[in-house]
Amino acid sequence: MATKTIVLHQICGHRFIGQNETGDRIPVDGDQPAIGPKPTDLLLAALGSCTAYDVIDIMIKKRQPLTRYRIEVTGTQAETHPRRFTHITVTHYGSGPKVTEAALTRAAELSHTCYCAVAASLNAEITIQTVVEPWEDN
């Protein structure tokens, strides 16, 4: 089983820099004016990019490579806290000389139901453990 870790370093207020094990960084921002995406924006981006990787690979395997491709991910959030997403629509736009709508539709379906870890995580019951540790300067 693979384990992933993201460390979020507070810059100020609700502004953070997230960093993974390989040192890649991304700003996360809840302050105004924002310098980066909000956590909920990142969730939608994670879903869109995860499924995009799958769709591109599936279409190549089908010998129908995409020459133009984009995804739009739209989420509707509840009005009350925790303001979870109640509905997410992932719209795929793709074309290529050999691309058929049926193949693209099937690739998107396979990604959502079989391959995309983010979609599977959103559809699953996830155990979330919360741990609090004192800050120790080393």
Image (spheres, rainbow, N blue to C red):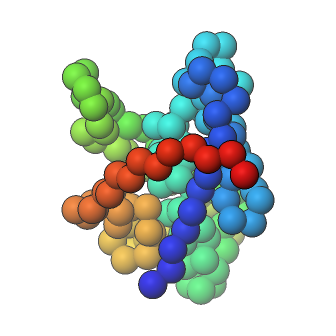
Residue 109 point in image, percent of width and height: 37, 68
Quarter location, residue 82? top left
Residue shown at 51% from the left, 37% from the top: 39
Q: Quarter of the image holding residue 79?
A: top left
Q: Residue 42's x, y, as percent?
A: 54, 43
Q: Nearer the viewer, residue 131 or 138?
A: 138
Q: Number of marks in the image?
A: 0
Left or right, 31 with respect to 73, comes to right
Viewer-proximal residue, 90 or 77?
77
117 or 53: nearer the eye? 117
Can see residue 54?
A: yes
Residue 70 point in image, percent of width and height? 61, 51
The residue under the point 43% across, 61% down is 118
Q: Is residue 88 above or below residue 78?
A: below
Q: Residue furthest top?
A: 32
Who's the residue at 25% across and 39% down the image?
Answer: 86
Q: Is residue 71 above or below residue 21?
A: above
Relative to 33, residue 103 above or below? below
Q: Is residue 93 visible?
A: no
Q: Residue at x 27, y 62 (%)?
A: 127
Residue 26 percent coordinates (x, y): 70, 44
Q: Depth check: 72 or 100 in front?
A: 72
Is 38 placed left or right of 85 in the picture? right
Farthest residue, direction right: 23
| Residue 103 appears left or right of 99 | left
Which quadrant would the N terminus be assigned to in this image?
bottom left
